[in-house]
């Protein structure tokens, strides 16, 4: 994985629900990893569903293998835009990680 291709700064966030002083659980997203990534593939597919068109944004990001454990319950944020993680694939023997996402 070449460092020059890692042009995008991304953040992986995990949902938490801490309990406040009044006993109410407040859901929030906490950053667990900030790293550089290569945007390998970004596609926009428009298709007809029901009465109107729907925009479906998918992308594939490549990062160096992280020390933090990432799951599909986490989300990826790039330029303030959140993406839900659809799938993870290891590249080589812990050389990198391929993250497939869809816009939230």
Image (cartoon, rainbow, N blue to C red):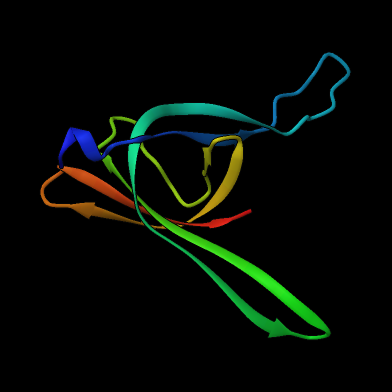
* Quarter-of-image position of residue 33: top left
Residue sitting at 78 percent across and 29 percent down?
26
Residue 7 in picture, x, y percent from top left: 33, 35
Residue extending furthest toward the left: 93
Q: Quadrant of the N terminus?
A: top left
Looking at the image, which residue sits at the far right?
Answer: 22
Residue drawn where x is 46% and y is 27% of the image:
32
Q: Is residue 83 above or below residue 9?
A: below
Q: Which of 34 and 20 is in front in this view?
A: 34
In the figure, is residue 103 to the left or right of 7? right
- Indicate the position of residue 95 as horizontal and vertical percent values: 15, 42
55 or 21, nearer to the observer = 55
Residue 82 found in image quarter: top right
Residue drawn at point x = 80 percent, y = 18 percent: 20
Look at the picture and state if 59 lies above or below 28: below
Front-most of residues 20 and 5: 5
User: Looking at the picture, how far across and down is residue 15, in whole percent?
Assistant: 61, 37
Q: Please give the name of the residue rendered at 79% of the width and 86% of the height, measured from the top-left corner.
A: 50
Residue 86 place in picture, x, y as percent: 47, 60
Is 46 left or right of 88, judged from the image as shown? right
- Left or right of 38 on screen, residue 74: right
- In the image shown, does 99 or 93 lie closer to the viewer? 99
């Amino acid at each position: 994985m070449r460092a020059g291709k890692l042009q995008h700064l991304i953040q992986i966030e995990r949902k938490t629900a801490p309990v406040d002083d009044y006993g109410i659980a407040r859901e929030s997203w906490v950053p667990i990893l900030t790293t550089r990534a290569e945007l390998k593939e970004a596609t926009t597919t428009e298709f007809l569903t029901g009465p109107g068109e729907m925009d479906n944004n998918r992308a594939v990001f490549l990062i160096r293998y992280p020390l933090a454990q990432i799951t599909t319950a986490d989300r990826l944020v790039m330029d303030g835009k959140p993406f839900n993680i659809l799938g993870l694939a290891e590249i080589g023997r812990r050389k990198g990680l391929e993250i497939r996402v869809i816009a939230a």
